[in-house]
Structure formats: structure tokens, C-alpha cells
Image (cartoon, coloured by chain):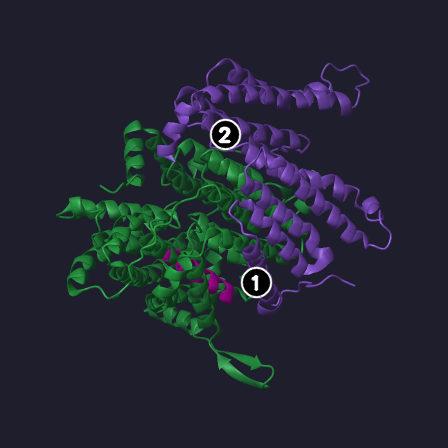
Chain colours: A purple, B green
Amino acid sequence: MSQGSGAAHASHSVTRHQSDVIFGVVFIVLALIGPVLGLIFGKSTPNGSLITDAVRAGWYSLPLAIFGVIALSVRIRSPQDYYGGAILSAMALFALWACSDLPGMRGFAFGPGTAPRLFAYMLLGFGVAVALVGLLTDGPPSGDYSFSGPLGGAVLIVALIPITYYSNKIGRWIPGVPPDVMVAALGAAVVLALAFLLVRFAPRGPLFITSATLIFAITVRPIGLVLASFVSLMVSAYATDEHRWVETIIWAAVLTLFCSLLFPWGLNLPLQLWPRL
Amino acid sequence: MDLISNLAQGFGVVFQFVDLKIAFLNITIPFPMNIFLCFVGAMVGTLIGVLPGIGPLATIAMLLPITFGLPPVGALIMLAGIYYGAQYGGSTTSILINIPGESSSVVTALDGHQMAKQGRAGPALAIAAIGSFIAGSFATVLVAALGVPLTAVALKFGPAEYFSLMVLGLVFAVVLARGSVLKALAMIMMGLLMSTVGSDIETGQSRLSFDIPELADGIGFVVVAMGVFGYAEIMRNLETTASREIVQTKITGLMPTMKDFKVAAPAIGRGTILGSTLGILPGGGAVIAAFAAYTFEKKMSKYPERFGHGVIEGVAAPESANNAAAQTSFIPLLTLGIPPNAVMALMVGAMTIHGIVPGPQVMTKQPELFWGLIASMWVGNLMLVVINLPLVGLWVRLLRVPYRMLFPAILIFCAIGVYSINNAPADAIMVAAFGLVGYWLVKHDFEPAPMLLGFVLGPLMEENLRRAMLIARGDPSTFLTRPISGVLLALAMLLLVLAFLPMIRKKRDEVFVEEPT
């Protein structure tokens, strides 16, 4: 790590500035999410109070703009620390917003919101401190794919939300096919298609490890452990570029056999092996 | 004398025979179930720990679900076996190929791999096993001896003391770990924050769960551990195409010579004592023990320049130390209920799933569990010697399995395992999500271990903080004015200040950077 980063440092010096610009803009956009959502979904205040929902939501997200402005105007000396700290701060602000409606201290007793808020403020503090260190001291650039990897995987997970939300409708698309199999098949197809689409921008590992797991999760109930494991194992083979077809198929079959013997029989877990017919 | 009768009770539990019905023969035979579980645990733990790139944390996280169907005592004995096995398997990997499976065997690789290159892999592996066994035996007695008095102390603790003790533990974990102190503190906070997701203990109000039913009970512990340690490791390993330099020479002559023993014996002794002491400290554990033992041995040696070129002390000392520490780190867990490191945090998770709340009451209310676990430590260490020495050949063959065949196995095992706990597909999706989180953390050089520790300690800390504040009628100075609590907090503060002092910081970094010279 330490040896490689020195060389990477020099060669990335041009592109690194570019990434600072991208992140700067991303953070400013993130900062505006609060007020914009507040304007759209906020309830209008009839008594003409100055503090509208938009302003209130902005309290939580607008501070992120500072990270963006800094990234746009100053050379970030240690991007790894700076962006790490910035994202942790964003997480803390998000948590603060999410528990803003929880009651706090009641007299001298803690309310449900006290501890989460306490931890979130401390995370915010340390996040800012880590970012400051990244601003003031030299350090390695962010690791390769540090954003595209998690982001690519996150897209796959998010893509499942509309499918589960509309599962009742999707299940009736093709008459004769059981609704849960229909939903699972569509979900798996969408995840797989997205993964192959994103593989140009994001590393294979996170993309296909995530999609293999997602496909297992959505198919295991409708089509049973055996088929779900086999499909998911085949997908996972794409996580590396050195896969060989015959070997992959044989190995997936062996592992599927092993797992479908071990879990239901060896460990006595009630798992359904085959599709319900 | 209590010690002996207690240990006897423990061995009674370990050697318990249960009637095993063999269905098709329609007979029942007495079967030493716990010994069997200990053996299976150590075996499977070694098997998986040997695989390069899979450390004890990932191993335990991966194997947690298979212990859930067992009775609590058996499950914990098996988990402890898995832990020792994984620990030892890691050393085997680092001796035979120069890829340490986990950070605590990084130092073993320095001299161990050199020995292997000189055709002395056999003695290196043997001395690692023997050293580990001696250290393990000593540490077992130490755990048994310290268990009773420490529990007595712990029973006097009130909520304020508990809270301060946990603060101290977390600070220790930060200071004794490698990497930036600030980042580790941030990780702890992230873990604490994550632990508040779900319903509030006192009011039942749902917090940070966004009305998602899967989050209403909080984030599952296995989900976090598997994602952050298992999945993230796979994602990261797939990017590095590390060349594996397996020692090709046939391993002949397993036994070390008389001269080897003479040189290694004092090293084992020193490593054991150093490791046992460091293991008890919160935040310590196997990693720092191994590093410290190696450094100490090098300082003591008459020929420090030969370290890194295959001296047997360089294997014996860190291996004894990390095994001793691995065991004594059970002391804070079993007596105070506070996991001193991430592995013990995993044990807490396993105990809670079995309905055991770790803490001083375990010893008084479930003595069979407490002493059984301690006795099983010794048995587990014996197993390691029995399993490993004859099976070295098998482990070597396992090392040749290419990673492209390894990772799908880990993946599907994790996915089925986590799904089977609650039959909840959402859990598997969450594992994938936490895998991405873990991947991101590693890319930004954040250690995930403190996060897991914070996550496990979170509910306990919050509960004790709330109680202490309620008792003190909302006066936070109670943490400073109660003597024990005040001392603990002062210690924590002092440690933090020390860790930030430039001079100490440099020394701390040096301990973790032990390059072959």
C-alpha cells in the first residue's frame, strides 16, 4: 500500500485535480438536496413563520457545501482522508436529520433521541477532524475505485426498491407464471443487466459480488436453495476476469451440492430446496 | 483449591457424554458431544484460516450461523475452537506462503517464511504449534485464576463505572491498534451510531429505521460482521493479483532439533508472558502481542541482525504470544462482559443470540458454561497440535486452491448462512450493502474493527449512560466524582493524550512496522 501509493501519487497528479472538481460539485449538489426536498415535500406554514421546512431541512444538508467549496478552491493534499472524513460527516448529518423528530431529554432522563444525537454529533466532529487532517497534511490519494465500487454496488441495491414496491403489479404480468417467480426473475434480470452496464465504470469485484448476493436473496424463496445457489454462483464467477466456463459450471455444481447437503441436513436448518410446484 | 475444583467442573462439562441416537440402527451410544464440537471447530477453523486472505474475523463471521442450532455451551466451545483454529491456520499460511492470513501472523511470516525457504518449514510449523500449546495452557490457567477475583470486582460496578470502563476499553482499542487514532475514533462513533438503529430499549420508539420493517429490530450483528469482514475482503482481494510464492520443497523432518528447542524455549516463555499480559488489556489481543513479542525478542537477542533471516525464536515468540493473548482476551469478556477486541465482539454477538448476556453474572448463574468454556480452551489447544502436525501436507495442498474457486464458496456460504438465521432474504441484501461499506472503509484506510467494537458495545453503553445519569439526577459530573469511574476516565484521557503526543506516536507507528532487515 505505502509503496504503491507513492508512484500513484505522481502519475495521478493531473487526473486528481479533475476528481477534486467532480467531488466538489457532488458535495454541493448533496448540500442542496435538503432545502429542495424541503420545498417539495415540506408542509406550508400557515402562520407565516420564517423557518420553513425547506430551511429546516437545509440546516442538515447545507453544511456539506463547505466540503464542496473547499474541494473546488484548494488543492486537497490527502484525498483519502479528506473525502473519507467528508463522507462520514455527511453520514452524521443524515443521521441527525433522521432523528430530528425523536424526543430528546425529558427532565434529567434520556429520551430516545438523546443517544443517537450524541453519537451523531461526535461522528460529525471526528469526521470533520479527519477531513481537516486530509486538508492540512500530505497523504495518499483515495484508493482506486473507492467511489465507483461502492456506488456501482449501491445502484444495484437501489434498483431493487421499485421492483419490490410494485411487486404486486409485476407478479401479474404474465398469467400462468407464479407471481413470486415473476418478480424474482425480473429482479435478477435487472440486477444482471445493470451490472454488465456498469462494469465499464466500476470494478468487477464489488459489482458482481453484490449482484450474486442480490440474486440469491430475491430468488431463494421462489425457486428454492438449489437453483438460487447455482445461479448466484454462476454470476459470482464474473467478479474476476480469469474465469473459465467449464471449470465454473462444474465448481458451481459441486458447491451447490455441498451447500444443499450441509445446510438442510448437516445443520438441520429448515430450507426449501426446490421450487414449490 | 477452588481453582482446581472449578477447572474440574469445567473438564466435566467438556468431557460430558450425551446419548446419541443412531436412527437406522435404533441404538443409543454415549457420545462426547462437546469434545467433538471442539474438534470440529478447531478443524474447520484451521481449514478456513489456512486459506490465504481469510483472517479469523472473516472465518468466525462466516461460520457463526452454523453454531446457532447448537446448545449454548456447545456453540461457544465450537466457536472458541474455530477461533484458535483460524489463528493457527493463519500462521501456517504465513510460514508456507508469504501471505499472512491475518495481521497477527504478519510477524510470523518474517522469520517463518525464511525458515521455510531454507527447507525448515517443518520445524517452523512444529515450533509454532508447540509454542502455541504451551502458551495456551498457561493462559488457560491464568483465565481460570483471574476469573473469580475479577468477577467479584465487576459485581461491585454500578452503571457509571461500567460506562467509564467501556470508554476506557474503546480508548485502549484505538490506541493499541495500528493506523490513525482519529480515524479509529471516527469508526467507533460510526459503530455506536449504527447500534442505535432500531427500537429504543426504554420507550420502544423506533429510531433511524425509516419505517423499513427489516430495520425495526436494529441492524443484525452477523450482517455487519459478515459484510464488513467477509464480503469486503473478497471484493478487495479480487483486485490484487498477488503472486503466491508457495514453498515447493517437500516438507521433511517435522521435528525441531534439540538445539532448536534450547533456543526456542526461553522465547516461548517470554512470548507467553508478554502475550498473556497484553491480551488482558482491552484493545490488545493477538496483533499487538505478536508484534511486541517479536520486537522484544529481537532486543533481547545476542544476534538481532539475524532476525528476519529465519531464526526460530522469531517464530516461537510471536506465535506463543498471539495464542496466549487470544486466550487471555476472554478474561475481560467473561468477567466484565466487555469485548476487548473485534474477535471477542463477535463472541458477544454469538452469546447474545443464544440468550446469554456476557458479564459477571455468567460465572455465578451459568458456572457450567463459564468453566466449560475455559476447560475447552485447553482442549482446543491440544486439538491444534493433534490436528495440525499430521495434517501439514493437507494444508499445503489447500494453499494451492486458486482464489477464483475460493471466493464463490465463501460468498455462497455467507449468503446461505445469513439467510438461514431468520429466513429473511433482506438480511442477505444487507450483507451485500455492508460489504460495500466495508470496501469503502478499506479504500479510505479506515479500520473496520473499531467500528464493530462500537457497534457491539453501543447498546450497553447507552443503557449504562442513561441509568447512571438517571441515578445522578442528570448530573454528568457523577462519572468523575465516583472514584472508580473517575480513575477509569482519567486513564482513558491520559491514554488519548499520550497517543497524540508526537514522540509516542512515532514509537507506536514503529511497533507496527517491522520490516525484515
At 46% from the left and 72% from the top, the residue drawn is B36
Element at label 1: helix
Q: Is residue B466 visible?
A: no
Which label belongs to residue A84? 2
At 50% from the left and 67% from the top, the residue drawn is B74
In the image, residue A223 sits, relative to residue B161, either above or below, namely below
Residue A75: x and y, percent?
46, 16
Query: Per the image, is B85 magenta?
Result: yes
Task: Please report, as a chain letter, where disc 1 is located.
Answer: A
Task: Please report, as a chain letter, where disc 2 is located.
Answer: A
Residue type, mark 1 in image: Val
| Left or right: where B154 falls relative to B137 | right
In the image, residue A91 sits, relative to residue B10, either above or below, namely above
| Residue A223, quarter of picture | bottom right
Instruction: Tell which residue pokes out farthest to the right in this image.
Output: A175
Which residue corresponds to mark 1?
A254
Q: Is residue A21 visible?
A: yes
Residue B440: x and y, percent?
52, 36
Residue A25: x and y, percent?
59, 19
Residue B144: x and y, percent?
36, 62
| Left or right: where A189 falls relative to A149 | right
Q: Badge 1, how many Cα within 10 Å: few under 14, some, many 20+? A: some
At 79% from the left and 23% from the top, the residue drawn is A43
- CB within 8 Å, label 1 to label 2: no
Q: Nearer the viewer, residue B466 or B177?
A: B177
> Of the residues under marks 1 and 2, which one precedes in the sequence?
2
Look at the image and give the residue range highlighted in magenta.
B73-88
Q: Nearer the viewer, residue B471 or B39?
A: B39
Residue type, mark 2 in image: Gly
In the image, residue B13 sits, relative to residue B51, either above or below, namely below
Number of labels in the image equals 2
Image quarter where the C terminus of chain A lies is bottom right
